[in-house]
Image: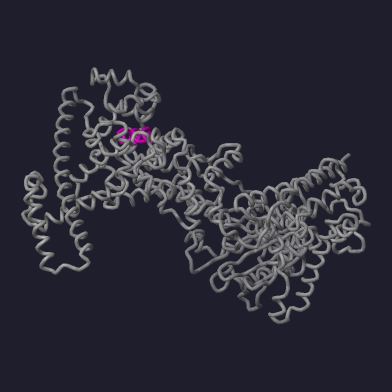
Amino acid sequence: MATTMAEADTRQRLVRTVMKEVKQIMEEAVTRKFVHEDSSHIVSFCAAVEACVLHGLKRRAAGFLRSNKIAALFMKVGKSFSPAEELCRKAQELEQILETKRSQSLQSQDSLRKIPRLPSLTPQTVKNLWIRTALFEKVLDKIVLFLVENCSKYYEKEALLMDPVDGPILASLLVGPCALEYTKMKTADHFWTDPSADELVQRHRIHSGHCRQDSPTKRPALCIQKRHSSSSMDERPSPSPSAREYVESLHQNNRAILLFGKNNVLVQPRDDMEAIPGYLSLHQTADLMTLKWTPNQLMNGSVGDLDYERSVYWDYAMTIPLEEIVYLHCHQQIDSGGTVVLVSKDGIQRPPLRFPRGGHLLQFLSCLENGLLPHGQLDPPLWSQRGKGKVFPKLKKRIPQGSTDSVSDKEEDEATDYVFRILFPNSQSEFAPPPDLIDREVTMWHPSLRKSSCSSCSPGSFSEGTMPKGCNHERAPLKLLCDNMKYQIISRAFYGWLAYCRHLSTVRTHLSALVNHAIVDPGFPHDACKGLTTEVWQAFLQNSTSFEEKELQRLVYFGGVEPSLRKEVWPFLLGHYQFGMTGDERKEVDERMRLCYQQTMYEWQSCEEIIRQREKEQHAVALAKCSSGASMDSSCQRIVHHDSTVSNESSQSSDRQSIARLQSDSSNSTQQELLDLYTLNLHRIDKDVQRCDRNYCYFTPANLEKLRNIMCSYIWRHLDIGYVQGMCDLLAPLLVILDDEALAFSCFTELMKRMNQNFPHGGAMDTHFANMRSLIQILDSELFELMHQNGDYTHFYFCYRWFLLDFKRELVYDDVFSVWETIWAAKFVSSSHFVLFIALALVEIYRDIILENNMDFTDIIKFFNEMAEHHNIKQIVTLARDLVCKVQMLIENK
């Protein structure tokens, strides 16, 4: 029964591996619109399919070609299956070409050109050549299906293809990859065939079965990794396809010098297992010394690839940088070659290294000391002061008090212990002992009679079960050193905490200007999620003292304004009215603004008449010049110009008297500059008005004329700023809601007091980008790292249109209304920079899609352009409010 279960598990594991590889290939085909022949997914897929096809294969099915069982199998199938016969012919041709190229590697370049293009020449490709050829020829699924239908002829009973369920499943899995096109080159339209933003969102919805744990609206969990003195999990190399490269790196190479190497060094990885032998090696690079211990089981090249990569012994392998080690506790035993315990800066002991007999411990210490020079050294040094050369120092053991035994002459040959410290004199080590310990250097290294606490000296640390003779490891000076290490660890923890507090203080100082410090509760004094309703607004209009301004702003911020009330409420939110005004005061403001608007209209329309007349006359002169076919002499030109100017001045004198700006300076050149400047702005306005939201039902020709009148009036009063493309986009939603020229003009003027700084003549855009960079870096460091790595688009230029137009181009009109009134109310409730948090919410909503697709700057611009007017605005605004609250709590240290 156990054997049957094991065989079933093996079959399931093989099928799951093929499923995973097929999924990766199909996803690559959908995402990139092509699959490269040298893709790593192809290599992994071929290896997985080959393992399935060879599982449980009968010996006689492999024929005499023992070195290539797949080739033998396919050739036998080819005798009764024509697609396999054709495949065998092509595969043998490729093998012949490979063999020819290997044997004639020195032939001329001309003859090399005659060799057909090969799929690839890597060793892995050659190994799976038959499977790859069958895949590229689109017959792999047919051959496997033939094997499934005739499985009893080729396979044992426990084989995967003999299983009535797993066999057909495997054949079905191969249909998809065999239908794809494989190429060496990218398609010509590769940059235009990437998946759309909508497709990426749909894929994410399908694949994301659970919410992200580290959502920006939640405080991330602390990831603390426990460390144990008897475990080497932190130092083990990861079991990856480069595992054999790791074993090869244990030898001398061009990057590292092998200082020491010894096999059969014992290590006991855990207390519940026996010590296992391994290869200990000491490597030196330009700036680092590394100690590696690799179990012997990983040095065996005959282990199968799959078993090798998944070997449990990878959990025991160690790679230890010597710069992390502070102390070496050396224990000498009479009946063995000695033991070394490495103690790192954090006080953690590595598993003991037990050397075989024969002086290998002394050789290791000698190589280590030579490798440390000239930048470091062992303290005390191995060099003997008695001129005997480099010998392992021997310390005399003290006789316990009360003992009458004398010290024999051969005491120096008995077991002794020693502690070495790794010093780097040129650097200030934070683990250096205090001055009082340095003064007692002579007594520091003498053994004491206290009970040892070294984990390597405990009875459970040795398979013999006995404590090494003469281990006086914890002596009084060593206790002081351990205490000093403890103080240093506490000190490091304190200074780490202090650095964190200082960083948090910097964060608070930097972010404090982005949010209001007072956190407003959406549920107090009552729930604000319903927004500003008709009942509340009517009560406010009847008695302005019934609701305070901050309460109305709170309702708008958390719930918005009822659509039917926007025409009445927006003038209050934008500052056209003050919340404490009575009805008569509001009427007075409206009348004053209407007169101002009419006067402004009269001024710029009079100026426009002058401009139109000038253009008409200039056009007539140009036509006359073209019709005559000959150029006028200079005197005629001056006469025509003079006459036109005189006639213009006489006919328009009454209009020009009403244009205060043109009469403010008696200089004709100044008037000319003003006319030229307004002419330039007028042409820009006409061009943008005709293109502004033409598909929206409100903008009939009559309403487009209203839009032009308001924009021309604003620019006439702000000629120093002038018209910039995008201003019409900010005015259009106001006119849609207010539907009144004078009121829209006043509200637009108030809106532009904030928005003007976002245009090129202002300096707010760089500030927005810098604040976005800070917010992302603090609240979502993973996404910031991706942006930094993929071309470094942490400049956030892709947000430019968002900030310039308050997201007007990103949303449909109803959503624009909702977002704008929330932004206006946020200034008094949570943040005057609420647009930053909406932008941050837009990025965070799609952050998993950005990470999954490894987007660069071009990808993210394309993505958000395609997602325009497809956002879930309720979700985005809710997240933006949560992000504001998170920053507020961060500043308050809650």
Viewer-side residue, 83 vs 343: 83
Magenta highlight range: 816-828
Say above or below: 507 vs 76.
Answer: above
Colour treatment of the image: one colour
Q: Is residue 467 visible?
A: no
Q: Quadrant of the C terminus?
A: top left
Where residue 868 sits, quadrant-wise, is top left
Viewer-side residue, 795 vs 205: 205
Q: Find out whether residue 387 is within the magenta segment.
A: no
User: Which residue ends up furthest to the front in the rendered image?
Assistant: 628
Say above or below: 182 vs 749.
Answer: below
Question: At which x and y percent is residue 494?
Answer: 46, 48
Viewer-side residue, 204 vs 410: 204
Q: Is residue 544 left or right of residue 536?
A: left
Q: How many marks?
A: 0
Residue at screen point 60% across, 50% down: 31
Where residue 577 sits, quadrant-wise, is top left
Viewer-side residue, 143 vs 7: 143
Question: At which x and y percent is residue 819?
Answer: 37, 35
Q: Is residue 737 visible?
A: yes
Q: Find out whether residue 824 is within the magenta segment.
A: yes
Q: Is residue 94 left or right of residue 194?
A: right
- The rendered magenta stretch, by its main secondary structure, is classed as helix
Q: Is residue 478 left or right of residue 54?
A: left
Residue at screen point 77% across, 66% down: 357
Say above or below: 96 vs 819.
Answer: below
Question: At which x and y percent is residue 479?
Answer: 57, 54
Q: Quadrant of the N terminus?
A: top right
Question: At which x and y percent is residue 42?
Answer: 70, 56
